[in-house]
Image (cartoon, coloured by chain):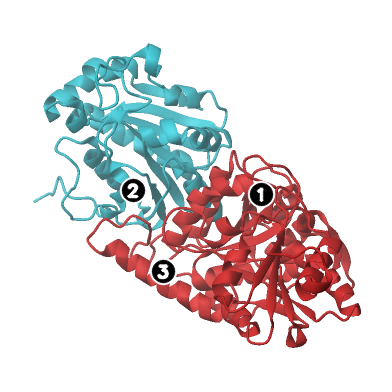
Chain colours: A red, B cyan
Amino acid sequence: MAKILMCGNEVIGEAAVHAGCTFYAGYPITPQNELTHYMSFRMQEAGGTFIQAESELAAINLVLGASAAGARAMTSSSSPGISLKQEGISYMAACQLPAVIVNMMRGGPGLGNIAPSQADYFQATRGGGHGDYRTMVLAPSTVEEAWNLTQLAFDLADEYRNPVMILGDGILGQMMEPVEVVRRHLNGRNAVSSHKPWALTGCKGRKPNVVRSLFLGEGELEELNRIMQMKYNKIKSKEPRFESLYTEDSDLVVVAYGTTSRIVRSAISKARHEHLHVGMFRPVTLWPFPEAQLQKLARKSKAFLVVEMSAGQMLDDVKLSILGQRPIHFHGRAGGGVPTEEAIIEAIKDILKPKSRKRVYA
Amino acid sequence: MKKVFERPASLRAVPTHYCSGCGHSIVHRLVCEVIDELGIREDVIAVCPVGCAVIAYEYWDFDCSEAPHGRTPCVATGIKRVHPDKVVFSYQGDGDLAAIGTAEIIHTANRGENITVFFINNGVYGMTNGQMAPTTLIGQKTSTSIHGRDITRDGYPMKMSELLSQLPGAKYIERVSVDNPANVLKTRAAIKKALKCQMEGKGFSLVEILSPCPTYWGLSPKDACRRIEDEMSKAFPLGVIKDA
């Protein structure tokens, strides 16, 4: 099948349709608008529902309702809008409702700017709203990967009955790349997840279903939390995904995800031409973070360098994985700044050849 | 012997948690009576609000969802769009509908969503200790207006039904009360009319129900009902506001 050119935002929309998403609600915000535009006509063509909501609060709660009714549902936004959605995401996690939420991150805090950023990592991976919960977070680095991960997101959301976030940024959302748009065959996962006995469909022939997150009875809420943590532990053991590049012979491993990993990939390729033993570890799932897989690399690699479009957020997860066994360096830019290939190569050289250089990274 | 009064099949046989003289119990029952009469128990999906009525699903024997405070009509809309053949209603208090969820109810009505809203107006936040609501009467004492609602500080009681009736998407809006047996019967008729409006695919319907809260009005159940007639229904006149 021929490849076509599509931007990341649109590909996520098409992938959602192919994954069986029949409900989308959104609210305008840059840099994710192409996705809302796309869904406004594509949902109609596909026989689904599109609602341009009055706010991000409304959009996430429309999705909550559609999900409670058993539909595969999605919303999308960018950083400030995702902050507003956190109320609904917490409720959905507590109600054990699946949904896919797309965050095309922009510079922050506050209204920030519309430049690419990775500064919502903490918010995405630590829960984001109130209470003890997590959302699974998938971080595509190419348009093609966005196609695959969006479909996976719907499967994971249904399987674990939990919201899943696609975390990208303005570059990924708006950049066009060739992609093979194919309808994915139903696999075992789909077959299991299409059966939703908990959904609100009218109580014909069964006892009434209730979707709730209020538990006032003694010990009831603690029990819900116990069940949720069991689920999260299962996710942590089964679902980490990552890519590693040249890590088998690397003295230094650069850890980066999403758009940043593309710059790192090209920096590494140049550094290896200069005979520098450097590789890359790219988490594809940010939660669950591929902790054990990164941990293994600490046995043979001498040091780690984390590169992010933030003041250092994934850095914490790398530290929690390496547990002080190796030095961990950081290179990042916050507020919409994008690390350059040159700066990353400089940082790599500072670490691998500190004696021959003036500047040393601490 | 002919049975003239019984518990509706849609209403579970459980003790109430509501305070003595609270209007919620009456409205819960009326909703169930109408659902039974229309024979739609297995086709109904209700959305319960944050507030005293959050556990309405403990009483209602049909599918229900909770919703975050004020987002009740959004959750109802999401459900209805997925299941257009089901009868979907939200049940909301005045804090939920007229304060935190003002934007949501206006836009739900404006899109002409084919859902029904039962709006319980008792002029206070009952669940959180009786604070002032947007619908609190001028001069009414609450836990956040201890000297009485002052228009220079707190603004005016909001007439949500009149406000919503301006929107073309809203098809049927009526304000009723449960302060005496005659008005209870009118409330029952309005609930039925609103659900039928939805079942006929006409669009957004809302029944505002003036409802006593003796606990946070500081009155006996009997005096609370009298207050609806003497004071509340003067500020919020009863009757059909829109029937398009």
Measure how far apart labels 2 and 1 are at the Cα level.
Answer: 42 Å
The residue tagged 1 is: A78
Residue B192 relative to residue B147: left or right: right
Q: Nearer the viewer, residue B110 or B243?
A: B110
**Helix, strand, or loop for circle 2?**
helix
Could you tell me the amino acid type at mark 2?
Ile
Please tell me which residue is depicted at 63% across the width and 82% down the height of the picture: A298
Q: Nearer the viewer, residue A219 or A207?
A: A219
Please tell me which residue is depicted at 17% across the width and 40% down the height of the picture: B19
Q: Please give the chain letter of the residue carrying mark 2.
A: B
**Helix, strand, or loop for circle 1?**
loop
- Please report contact status of discs 3 and 1: CB closer than 8 Å, yes or no: no
Q: Residues within 10 Å of mark 2 (few under 14, many from 20)?
A: many
On the image, the x and y values in percent for residue B195 come to 41, 41
Classify residue B111 by image quadrant: top right
Residue B58 seen in this snapshot: yes
> In the rendered image, which quarter contains the C terminus of chain A?
bottom right
Seen from this angle, which residue lies furthest left?
A: B1
Q: Please give the chain letter of the residue carrying mark 3.
A: A
The residue tagged 2 is: B35
Q: Is residue A255 above or below residue B116?
A: below
Q: Which mark is residue A228?
A: 3
On the image, the x and y values in percent for residue A309 come to 71, 57
Residue A223 relative to residue A144: left or right: left
**Same chain assignment for discs 3 and 2:** no
Q: Nearer the viewer, residue B208 or A236?
A: A236
Please tell me which residue is depicted at 27% across the width and 17% down the height of the picture: B148
